[in-house]
Image (spheres, rainbow, N blue to C red):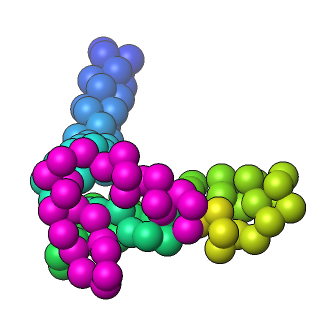
Amino acid sequence: MKQAITKKAMVIFTACLLFMTQPAYSLDLQTAKSQGLVGETPDGYLSAVKSPSAETKALIESVNLKRKQKYQEIATRNNTSLKAIEELAGNKAIEKSKPGSYIKQGGSWQKK
């Protein structure tokens, strides 16, 4: 009897944890872009197109942190500046952005 209650409690606890963490995984980069929440900037990073939710902010911070680490690796490997790699990456990201997504050019957001 005690073991059955413990198993039941563990299942409920696990279900609650999964339910609580679900929103953190519901927004991915492509969804955020297609919804017009984020866009590419000339400096190689994402930015919020309009006032971001906490979830959008977290996504932006996560993606930008990974990008910066990768850019720094490339800059170090090629003996060049981080700024040069950021600009190169920003131009490529803007070029590769799908129609309908937001890009920042001339300091303002534009739909591609």
| Quarter-of-image position of residue 65 | bottom right
Q: State the extent of the magenta-drawn residues as a range.
A: 87-112
The residue sitting at 18% across, 78% down in the picture is 51
Q: Does 26 lie within the magenta span?
A: no
Q: Nearer the viewer, residue 39 or 58?
A: 39
Q: Note whether residue 12 is visible.
A: yes
Judge left or right: residue 47 versus residue 70: left
Q: Position of residue 86 (x, y in %)?
A: 58, 66
- For the N terminus, the quadrant is top left
- For the C terminus, the quadrant is bottom left
The residue sitting at 46% across, 60% down in the picture is 91
Q: Note whether residue 54 is visible.
A: no
Reply above or below: 28 against 50.
Answer: above
Q: Position of residue 105 (x, y in %)?
A: 31, 74
Q: Does 110 lie within the magenta span?
A: yes
The residue sitting at 47% across, 53% down in the picture is 92
Q: Position of residue 84 (x, y in %)?
A: 66, 69
Q: Residue furthest bottom?
A: 107
Judge left or right: residue 101 versus residue 18: left
Q: Nearer the viewer, residue 106 or 36?
A: 106
Q: Position of residue 15 (x, y in %)?
A: 26, 33
**How many circles with numbers are drawn on the protein?**
0
The residue sitting at 36% across, 46% down in the picture is 96
